[in-house]
Amino acid sequence: MALIPSQVLRLAILLSYFSILCNYKAIDMPAHQTYGGSWKFLTFIDLVIQAVFFGVCVLTDLSSLLTKGSENQEQERQLKKLICLRDWMMAVLAFPVGVFVVTMFWTLYLYDRELVYPRLLDNFIPQWLNHGMHTTVLPFILIEMRTTHHRYPSRLCGLAAVCSFAMGYVLWMCWIHHVTGVWVYPLLDQIGPVAKIIFFTMLTALINVYYILGDILNSYIWDIPKCFTRSIVAVYSTCMLVVLLRVQLNIIGGYIYLDNSALSKNGMTPLVPPEVQEQYLSSIQHFLGDGLNELMTAVKQAVQNVLGGISLKQSISLLELEQHVNQIREQVEQRGRSGTAESNGNKSTLSSYMMPDEESTFLSNVSLPLAKVIPIVNGQINSICSDTPSQFVQDLLMIEQVKEFSANVYEAFSAPQQLQK
């Protein structure tokens, strides 16, 4: 796919839909002569939607090619309108209706083809045309989604538009039955009125599910934070691995020096202490495990905050890129161990992702029953009243309100009139 330009693919798909529509309209079938003609079938409506959609895509490509390098503001506005129309048709009509037609047709066809595509139609419609109407729609629309980024409308507006289309087609089928006394699809003749209401409701819900699925799939393919996150994490992790490798080489070099010194003195070869080996291996394990996961979470949140509203199609200068990267770095490198950026100005360096927090691990691993904790807390009174500086007192003295209180008392009792008394 990467070897073929997306513009050529869209033009080829558009021509294929024109060919399918022309061949289908050339078939002389009795159903085409009845009320509603071909327009009563959702398959034909879907073919028209797909043809119009890819026509808009080709027109957008041509307009983009013609306005490339132009400074005409009016042409740029018209191009943006075409892009908005293309994206709206993709989100609301082309993807959900196309996927609905393909999945529903082949599901009913495999269950009982007489319900949706009687064998009588084999005398009129060749197999290649049947697949052109009910099979190739899905890969064509997936190719378009994969090659071009489409901006979906808000979830509420999109679902409202899809529901409007679904209800409009249901009312159209009911009107045809009211005029002709015949349902468009034989399946509807075999179920009662209540079952029809449930059936139509379920199909409307299903096409809404396909809209949401398209939105999720489009976001997955063209997720800007995810794409940029992978790049930033790759750079960060590579730098950290280089640092760890240098540390390892320094350790090895240091012990080689000690080996040579020891051999020159007493001829005995010293071994690297096991605790040193364990500490280094634990740091490597921490980075490749928890550290890398924490780094990915931090980078993903920072990229989402900085680049959340930027499209992959948007042009960006080197200066803007530098500013965005600096903002991402600032958020990542100021991220506290709790998972949020610290507000007290103390930066949590990247070493926290490379080395385990031994104090945090120790505090979280030690646990005692509350009944045993209470005497320990009461025992702290002795340490507070002793001459040794207490951490509790120091923490209390560092509170801003206590500082102000102490300053006010000192100022009040240090006044000249107070000293004379």
Image (cartoon, helix red, strand yellow):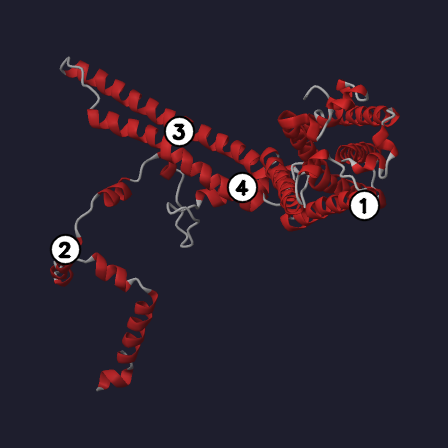
**Residue toward you, 40 or 299:** 40
Residue 360 screen position, x and y as percent: 28, 44
First-in-chain label (4 vs 3): 3
> Do the residues bearing badges 2 and 1 touch, measured as CB atoms within 8 Å?
no
Q: Label 3 belongs to which residue?
A: 243
Residue 74 screen position, x and y as percent: 85, 45
Q: Amino acid at mark 3?
A: Val
Mark 4, mark 2: which one is toward the viewer?
A: 2
- Residue drawn where x is 88% and y is 25% of the image: 26
CA gap, disc 2 and disc 3: 46 Å
Image quarter of residue 245? top left
CA gap, disc 4 and disc 1: 30 Å
Image quarter of residue 276? top left
Element assignment for label 3 = helix
First-in-chain label (2 vs 1): 1
Element assignment for label 2 = helix
Q: Label 1 belongs to which residue?
A: 77
Q: Amino acid at mark 1?
A: Arg
CA gap, disc 2 and disc 1: 73 Å
Using residue 204 as the reference point, say whether residue 39 is left or right of it: right
Q: Label 4 belongs to which residue?
A: 303
**Residue toward you, 179 or 369:** 179
Residue 156 screen position, x and y as percent: 64, 50
